[in-house]
Image (cartoon, grey):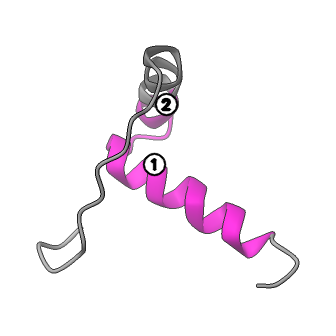
Amino acid sequence: MSRQDRQLNIRIPHKLIAELKKNAEVNKRSMTAQLNFIIEEWLKNQPNS
């Protein structure tokens, strides 16, 4: 992720953060990279994409 990318602050429940952290570790990604991957995949699967 580059410094030119926009920053977004969001609130996420502790349980979801723990699951995300485990998932990122399994996939050898940072939490930011994992979130970007999840969002990009979700957007690809939307009917209007």
Q: In which quarter of the image is the N terminus?
A: bottom left
Q: What element carries label 1?
A: helix
Q: Residue 20 carries which label?
A: 2
Q: Distance between the residues labelled 1 and 2?
A: 8 Å
> Looking at the picture, does residue 12 appear above or below residue 5?
above
The reply, left or right, for residue 3 in relation to residue 33 is left
The reply, left or right, for residue 23 in relation to residue 5 is right
> Looking at the picture, does residue 22 appear above or below residue 32?
above
* Residue in the image at 66% along x and 64% along y: 41
The reply, left or right, for residue 22 in relation to residue 47 is left
Range drawn in magenta:
23-45
User: Residue 29, image x and y in percent?
Assistant: 38, 45
* Residue in the image at 29% along x and 50% along y: 9
Residue lying at the far left of the rendered structure: 3
Q: What element carries label 2?
A: helix
> Looking at the picture, does residue 43 appear above or below residue 29?
below
* Residue in the image at 39% along x and 35% along y: 11
Q: Name the residue under label 1.
A: 34
Q: Which amino acid does label 1 sit on?
A: Gln
Neighbor class of circle 2 (other Cα within 10 Å; few <14, some 14-19, many 20+) is some
Is residue 15 located in the magenta-colored stretch of the structure?
no
Q: In which quarter of the image is the C terminus?
A: bottom right
Q: What residue type is labelled 2?
A: Leu
Labels 1 and 2 touching (C-beta < 8 A): yes
Nearer to us in this view, 2 or 46 = 46
